[in-house]
Image (spheres, grey):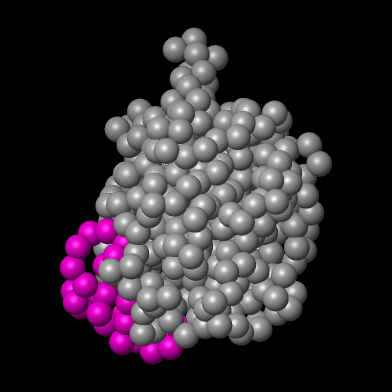
Amino acid sequence: METTDAFASLRCMACDGQFDAENAGRCPDCSGPLAPRYDDLASAHGMVFDGATAGSDLGRFAPVLPFSRESLVTAGEASTPLVDAPSLADDLGVGEVLLKDEGCNGTGGIADREMAVAVTAAREHGADAVALPTTGSGGQAAAAYASRAGLESHSFVPSRTTFANKAMINVHGGDMNVVGGRYPDARGAFEDAVAGESWHSLAPFAEPYRHEGSKTIAYELVEALDAAPDAVVVPTGQGISLVGIDRGFRELRATGWIDDRPRLYAAQAAGCDPVAAAWQAGADAVDPVERPDAICGPLEIPDPAGGAAVLDAITATDGGAVATPDEEILEGAVTLAGAGIPVSGTGGAAVSGARALADEGAFAGGETVVLLDPATANREADILRSHLMKQGI
């Protein structure tokens, strides 16, 4: 594989075992999730922040990623806007609220960052095809990046996924299997199918690299603010985004580029809140939600693959987890959109979650709070429009 100088090995996030980069899946010892380990990140950070790597796509972060810029499968992702939301800052009683708009990535979501790295890894491991269960966004990005890399892609999607997500998987050249029911049904169909194929799995935390793409958000925030924000609120389903962002801030703190890591908060839907429930109970692992019910598919993950890692991250940063009802999530999205800042339905969880956290006294006056919007508002436009129609609008 064509790797970067800093990439040293893979480390298990559960048992701390270390393995060489040829391992493409989970930990051989305990089946825990793997993540890249690096040497001499201080020099790599210097290359990123001192402008030695030009461009605006994920390739400019190659020194702190496993794969070289030349080998990375990129498509103009990353360098997304950080949008000021002054009215929301006033409501929350903080100095500044900034929305990190991941909807500006090519396929319309944060999954582009994930797939830029994960599909590269699949190709470097000699795969001919990739496959995953998905609520939609990951499948769309996987189809696009696999096509760019010359690979086949196979997505297993629950039938309740929005039409736009399902359509674009096919438009990007991907094979789509629509499975009746919810995400666990799609995951079951994927597991049955992949057992008889040589497909490279891109299922959440089944390989070491999707969360590595997400960590670049931490680098962009520090670059834009010249420091870490005080808090980051992340809509959380599987936990890939939050775990990745935490990895980025950990690395930056370890090399002294930031003084402190920000508090990380997982924002979930009240109808499917395994992380928030575990947090409130003081548990170190999540229990699956028996009857998940969330209107935004990416939030309806009853048994998140990254649940334990999310709990580790929010605990280590003195953050937390919060769950709000669907109505508040959608209202958060349309309220901000009405102020000229488009927000996806899923991103509305960050807005409503931040409001709930502010009511609990989680933020101090003068703090900078970042809300992550993981997808374009257009992806869930029907859900937002239905919410308004219920209000007679």
Q: Quadrant of the N terminus?
A: bottom left
Residue at x-position 71% and y-position 30%: 181
Residue at x-position 57% and y-position 69%: 24
Foreground residue among 50 and 23: 23
- Outermost residue to the top: 392
Residue at x-position 79% and y-position 54%: 287
Foreground residue among 129 and 300: 129
144, above or below 321, in the image? above
In the rendered image, residue 335 lying in the magenta stretch gets the answer: no
In the rendered image, residue 55 lying in the magenta stretch gets the answer: yes
Query: Where is residue 282 drawn, in percent x and y?
Result: 76, 63
Where residue 2 sits, quadrant-wise, is bottom left
183, above or below 151, in the image? above
389, above or below 43, in the image? above
Side of 281 where 231 appears, left or right: left
Q: Is residue 2 visible?
A: yes
Side of 210 where 283 appears, left or right: right
